[in-house]
Amino acid sequence: MPREAVFFDRDGTLIEEAHYLADPDCVRLIPGAADAVRALNAAGALVIVVTNQSGVARGYFPESRVDEVHERLSRLLAEFGAKVDAYYYCPHHETTGSCDCRKPKPGMLLTAARDFDIDLARSWMIGDKACDAGAGVAAGCRTLLVRTGHGATLPGAVADVGEAVSVVLRARS
């Protein structure tokens, strides 16, 4: 039976926004993010991070740095008994227009759905930018935006990832 997932944007949603984050030592969890992820883990939902990383295409850092940042994020979450089931990232520059993975395109979500047998109609996309919501809508997910990161002034956004996960969990009951 297809599974439910919660897709998260990374920067500004789960971790503090850092312009072109390439240093794993600079990863800082947004308060409440680990508790939110742990609650989803306990509820049996897949937790998947989908993130645009154009710093790779711009030459600011190698792809290996993206993996190192994800490893650091996983270690920080593990300290709270939380885990991400998978990470997907788009290393392309937004001006190339040649990929199907850069949010707001749904490619990362669609790939994850194939990889994990995910029911996208039962799944959610949570992020801090309109492109995050756009990817979720394009993939057929429900979406929530948070006021952390770039989302401070987004109309209809919830306070943070903790509140967003509360909405998701209430919708499941």
Image (cartoon, rainbow, N blue to C red):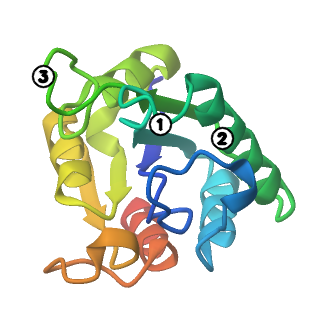
Query: Which badge, 1 or 2, is on the more N-terminal residue?
Result: 1
Residue at 52% x, 40% y: name it. 48
Residue at 43% x, 39% y: name it. 50
C-alpha separation, residue under disc 1 versus residue under disc 2: 17 Å
Q: Which mark is residue 60?
A: 1
Q: Is residue 121 above or below residue 116?
A: below
Q: Residue furthest front?
A: 59
Label 3, secondary structure: give it: loop
Residue at 25% x, 60% y: name it. 129
**Closer to the camera in the image, 99 or 45:** 99
Residue at 68% x, 60% y: name it. 26
Where is residue 149? Give x, y as percent: 39, 71
C-alpha separation, residue under disc 3 versus residue under disc 2: 25 Å
**Closer to the camera in the image, 55 or 167:** 55
Query: Which badge, 3 or 2, is on the more N-terminal residue?
Result: 2
C-alpha separation, residue under disc 3 versus residue under disc 1: 19 Å
Query: Which badge, 3 or 1, is on the more N-terminal residue?
Result: 1
